[in-house]
Image: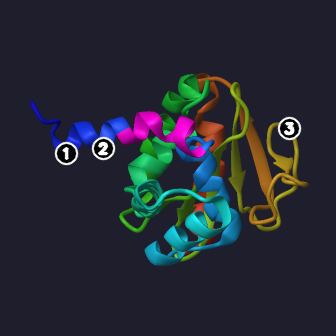
């Protein structure tokens, strides 16, 4: 009995590390470092610089480009992998509260964080470690004190940061700071 196309694809994916010397994620890093975004250019680079066969180069390029076009929920899911899964309920609790601010709230997932926007970014949510989410907040003319610390080297796109390690810290104080930032972004 002949293998289905899906089975053939899975066999290629299973054999990828042995046949090419790298996992799919490692190939993604190579392509990212080359700053390529066209199928033909990716295939050419993999074949010429890495001696990857055409079939595997084609597969890697397709998977890479499909990943780049992935749905926002996939980007968010990827942020909460590799030991960070317990933080996902914290993210969900924060976004659930933020969506109540108004219908102009935009949740814009990036590779490593989620930007919260109105007319401009007013906050971001980033799972920084396996035990902590950092909430970056843009609050003009607000002094840093207590949990609301200066963003420092955390992220230049926000003025403040709040470290969250437990869902109980998604409290009225945090939501009030986020709501003030939302209002300032309008």
Specify the quadrant that holds the C terminus: bottom right
Q: Are marks 1 and 2 in contact (CB under 8 Å)?
A: yes
Query: In x, y percent, where is residue 171?
Result: 59, 33
Numbered label attached to residue 74: none
Please give the count of numbered marks on the rendered protein. 3
Residue displayed at 54% across by 73% down: 44
| Res 97 seen here | no
Numbered label attached to residue 146: 3
Q: Is residue 169 above or below residue 42?
A: above
Residue displayed at 61% across by 63% down: 31
Q: Which residue is mark 1?
A: 5
Q: Quadrant of residue 137?
A: bottom right
Q: Which residues are magenta?
A: 12-20
| Res 152 seen here | yes
**Is residue 14 on the magenta stretch?**
yes
Answer with left or right where residue 141 lies relative to residue 103. Answer: right
Query: In x, y percent, where is residue 78?
Result: 51, 41
**C-alpha distance separating marks 2 and 3:** 53 Å
Q: Which residue is mark 2?
A: 9
- Secondary structure under tag 1 reads helix
Query: In x, y percent, where is residue 115?
Result: 58, 59
Residue displayed at 70% across by 25% down: 131
């Amino acid at each position: 009995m002949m293998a289905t196309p899906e089975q053939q694809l899975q066999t290629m994916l299973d054999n990828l590390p042995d046949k090419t010397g790298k996992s799919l994620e490692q190939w993604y890093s190579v392509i990212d470092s080359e700053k390529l975004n066209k199928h033909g250019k990716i295939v050419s680079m993999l074949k010429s610089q890495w001696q990857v066969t055409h079939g595997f180069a084609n597969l890697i390029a397709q998977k890479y480009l499909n990943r780049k076009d992935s749905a926002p929920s996939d980007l968010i899911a990827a942020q909460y992998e590799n030991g960070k899964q317990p933080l996902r309920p914290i993210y969900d609790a924060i976004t659930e509260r933020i969506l109540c601010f108004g219908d102009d709230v935009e949740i814009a997932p990036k590779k490593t964080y989620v930007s919260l926007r109105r007319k401009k970014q007013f906050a971001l949510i980033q799972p920084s470690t396996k035990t902590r989410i950092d909430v970056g907040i843009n609050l003009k003319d607000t002094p840093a004190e207590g949990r609301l610390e200066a963003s420092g080297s955390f992220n230049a796109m926000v003025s403040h940061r709040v470290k969250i390690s437990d869902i109980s810290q998604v409290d009225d104080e945090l939501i009030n700071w986020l709501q003030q930032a939302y209002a300032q972004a309008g």
